[in-house]
Amino acid sequence: MAKKKASTKKPAAAVTAEQTKPAPAVKKEEPAAKKAEPAVKKEEPVAKKAEPAAKKEEPAAKKAEPAVKKEAPTAKAAEPAVKKEAPAAKAAEPAVKKEEPAAKKAKPAAKPAAKKPAAKKPAAKKAAPKAEKTVAEQPAPQVEEPKTEQPVQPVESAPAQPVYTSPRRSVAFIGSECHPFVKTGGLGDVMYALPRVLAQQNCDVRVILPRYACIPQKYQDKMVYRGEFYMDLGQTGRSYYVGIMEYVWDGVVYDFIDNQEFFSAGNPYIGLVDDIPKYCYFSKAALAALNYMNWIPDIVHCHDWQAALVPVYLRTLFKDSPVGRAKSVLTIHNLRFQGIYNIPTIRYWTGLPDEVFEMGALKQDYVNANMLKGGLAYADRITTVSNTYAWEIQTAEYGEKLQDHLRYHSYKLRGIVNGIDYGMWNPATDPSLAVNYDITNVLQHKPENKRALQQELGLVQDEGKFVIGLISRLTDQKGLDLVSAVIPQVMDGNTQVVVLGTGDKEYEDTFRYYENACKGMFSACIQYDEARAHRIYAGADALLVPSRFEPCGLTQLNAMHYGTLPIVRETGGLKDTVEPYNVFNGAGNGFTFDRYDAGLLLDAINRAKTEYFTSRYHWDEVVQRDMAKDVSWENSARQYKDLYLELTPW
Ligand code: ADP
């Protein structure tokens, strides 16, 4: 899931109701100034962003300059359009000015396009070096395209193409990350895998993403210039450049929204001060781009708070434009992140009408607006990534203060569990592994992978040790306080623990401490490393996922597919995908515990150990059962397709 501390209240949250009243609509400078305040203190770039907006008397051409100066080629790209300012600006208007269809207006802007393609490329090159940023939210663009060249026999895991002949539908996926271009977590995996399977299930799919500068150069190079136009944005008084760069891959069209002013940072997520304007822009630009390309989907499927304004724009500013006829689906990948900021700022950046800032929609309280909350109100359907989580988020414990709102909209809410991409996750062909294996030889080759992992990480090399993996963002959500509490009891001389992840310093340091304290038995890999993750899935015996909450969770699915038994807390998608092991009849997929309690986690780990050390035959049966379990996208994609058909019953 895309993670930004969306619900973090910024200093701006201190703005009182009175303060919120006067400024925004009338004096355009003020909201910007307010927005800039926290920004100025914290993040210079935003201050810069706010400035041009504040000086609304300056012509748009001038305002485009910051971006222009940054990137010479883009400047060129922008210039002609800037000169044609008036028509270009109109091109953006369609969404706003109901009376003229957007697609038509977009056309004038298309004319200056002729020289762009050449101009765009260098921009991409320039952008690339920024890819090295680190930390928890770091994307993992290093992953290669799904590979097929590994020297291994074709496997069970390549399911035969289902003959699925439901009616064709067109779907625009709109979201903030997508493997392999940019990924910080599960959202990136879903945005990659689901469109591809839907394409096989008779859907015409386009994925609309920001063109972040951190997208690896090899993908930037493959993008083809598709067009550009200018779009107004909220009360900024400016016209914003919207470039469209296209990449077609495996039946899916990827359209990247290009604007260096918003997307030139080395990381997709920076902080709300920057991210709120960025995703207000992105959501609107995505819809305007569909109008511009004259590709009007049956369904607009948006993901998480970063795209949650799409359904709101669709039913307000865009309702009389061509794309206004599309139905909308909003998927919650993680309810914790909502895009909350003070009302004047969001009003300023979106230009949405007053009725949208009511309690039934965006308004969170006297001070704040909540982008996800608005999206949930306006979407035609809401999905989340497991049945249990769909139920949990309607309770106070998991509802992140939106439980009432979700209960109100529960008639249009459903859970559809995630799958994993069998091309990307296949132990039989995985190029990262020491030895490839499938269900027929897993018992023979898994120990070899274990030994290779132990060697790689400097652990005692002994196939007899019980190796527990943990691959995770190191945040509160993931139950790491429980893990750190039980490690001393887990380290019994016969057990090794391997942690891979980045995140909160507190957890990073805890795991580093244990690595030092338990030399040769505990490995703390404080990094984001896709290939190493694959090797841990293959080399470990068990994988720990003791989350406080878990919308779906993908690591337990990856683990099962690699013959590694999950030890999970029974929450969200973990509950839906891991059937508890039953010692009496041998059924089940892994070891589970219910309450969020360190003692129960330890008990689950001990039950797993007992089974591993005293009943290996049964353990091995579960290994093979887990590898055979269908955790592919086929089923889930079919449920999404059914949902689209429900919404478009023609
Ligand atoms: P979330 O989206 O909450 O982060 P998920 O379980 O849904 O968690 O998805 C996590 C995905 O990110 C999995 O594919 C997992 O393998 C991958 N991942 C998480 N941390 C790392 C890491 N440090 N290095 C490599 N891959 C990681």
Image (cartoon, rainbow, N blue to C red):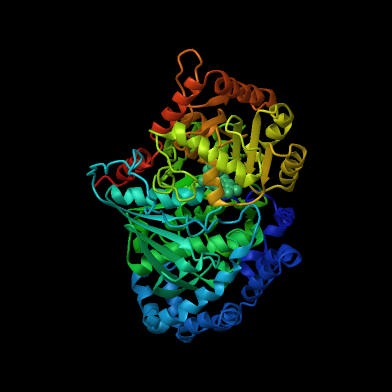
Residue at image position (43%, 75%) is: 229
Q: Is residue 58 left or right of residue 573?
A: right
User: Is residue 360 among what the camera can see?
Assistant: no
In the image, residue 138 above or below residue 483: below
Residue 248 falls in image quadrant: bottom left
Q: Position of residue 531 (x, y in %)?
A: 53, 51
In the image, residue 530 above or below residue 223: above
Residue at image position (66%, 37%) is: 460
User: Is residue 271 among what the camera can see?
Assistant: yes
Residue sitting at the far top: 584
Q: Position of residue 475 (x, y in %)?
A: 66, 43
Residue 495 falls in image quadrant: top right
Number of labels in the image equals 0
Q: Position of residue 323 (x, y in %)?
A: 36, 60
Q: Is residue 141 left or right of residue 92?
A: right
Looking at this view, is 406 or 602 the one in front? 602
Q: Is residue 547 left or right of residue 577?
A: right
Q: Position of residue 241 (x, y in %)?
A: 49, 74
